[in-house]
Amino acid sequence: MSTPSPSLAAAPACRACSAPLEHTFVDLGKSPPCESFLRADQLEQGEVFFPLHAMV
């Protein structure tokens, strides 16, 4: 699964007031979901990661 390039993705907006989000508050990179432990037979498979990027 590919992620869209920033120029093609919709600009992020506040879910409360729909104002555009323009500034990075914190960017913690990417992380797999918590509590998603892999079994020994799954270690060779790719793991899913999600961005941890808060904007204001």
Image (tube, rainbow, N blue to C red):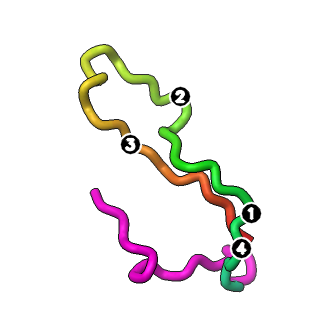
Q: Residue at x 63, y 49 (%)?
A: 28
Residue mark closest to the camera, 2 vs 3: 3
Amino acid type indicated by mark 1: Phe
Please tell me whether mark 2 sits on a helix, a strand or a loop: loop
Q: Earlier in the sequence, mark 2 or mark 4?
A: 4
Amino acid type indicated by mark 4: His
Residue 46 occupies quadrant:
top left
Residue mark closest to the camera, 2 vs 1: 1
Q: Earlier in the sequence, mark 2 or mark 3?
A: 2
Q: Earlier in the sequence, mark 1 or mark 3?
A: 1
Disc 4 crowd, CA 10 A, few/some/many (<14, 14-19, 20+): few
Please tell me whether mark 1 sits on a helix, a strand or a loop: strand
| Distance of label 1 from label 4 (alpha carbons) | 6 Å
Figure quadrant of the N terminus? bottom left
Image: 53 above or below 13: above
| Distance of label 1 from label 3 (alpha carbons) | 24 Å
Q: Is residue 10 left or right of residue 3?
A: right
Query: Disc 3 designates what residue?
Result: 48
Q: Are marks 1 and 4 in contact (CB under 8 Å)?
A: yes
